[in-house]
Image: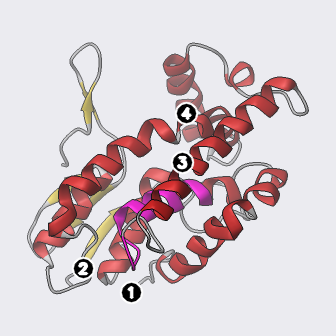
Amino acid sequence: MADIVFYDIPCKSTHVSASWSPNTMKTRYALNFKGARELGGQPTRMKPDGRPHYTLPMIHDKATGAVVTDSFKIACYLDQTYPSQPRLVPSSNFALVRAVEDALQPLLAPVYPFGVPATERILNPASAVYWRGTREAIFGMSLEELLPAPGSERESTQWAAVRASFDAIDDWVIRGCDRYLGGAEVGYADMHVAAFVRLVRDVLPADKWADMHSWHGGRWERLLVRLAEHELVPLV
């Protein structure tokens, strides 16, 4: 595969590995899975006032000149442009994977009250200011108000909602009679889930991963182990 420039989000934390953002981590997994050597796109969505909203991840494929934003669109682009590599989204299951992708977004939302405030603490100063301002506008409250107080009933209830979401994903895999959402082998949908699991492991307080890693017979820890070889992008 030709060189592809991958735009990620840095952080100041020394204990957080490679990518910390679930959105960019999905693309980092995808690029490595497809065999990329290294890591002016379109807006990913429009703001309420009609202005374009630009977010990461974004890639620039030097071989084709293409600039692609949005992690699912990037996965589809990689499959279309480099079909000889392992597929992220099997063509026979495209509609199903798209439906799962859409379902995962709200299903994983219970992680946000923990993940959004925790993320601010690992960002570089300029990014932290932007993060706080934009996220407080989105949620309509301060990050301190968004984060459930440790040991509170609200924290217990919110974490139970996170567990319920992963219960549902585990049920999807069991009903599919396979090892992964992607079937017998990992696919893009599994990378989406793994990106959020890594957020819990690397960014949230340690007690959250201490609890999650044993859920569902250790499924989520095994998923991270399976994808560990695709976490880092070698510099060339």
Single out the mark in the foreground, 1 or 2: 2
Residue found at the far right of this picture: 151
Which of the 4 image quarters holds residue 116?
top right
Return the residue at label 4: 131
Indicate the amino acid at tag 1.
Val
Of the residues under marks 4 and 1, which one precedes in the sequence? Answer: 4
Return the residue at label 1: 236
Q: Secondary structure at mark 4?
A: helix
Is the Cβ of the residue at disc 1 closer than 8 Å to that at disc 2?
yes
Indicate the amino acid at tag 3.
Ala
Left or right for 168, reference 26: right
Of the residues under marks 2 and 4, which one precedes in the sequence? Answer: 2
Which of the 4 image quarters holds residue 198?
bottom right
Of the residues under marks 3 and 4, which one precedes in the sequence? Answer: 4
The residue at the point 73 percent across, 49 percent down is 204
Return the residue at label 2: 3
Q: Secondary structure at mark 3?
A: helix
Q: How many marks?
A: 4
Residue 188 percent location from the top left of the image: 35, 64
Is 193 within the magenta? yes
The N terminus - image quarter: bottom left
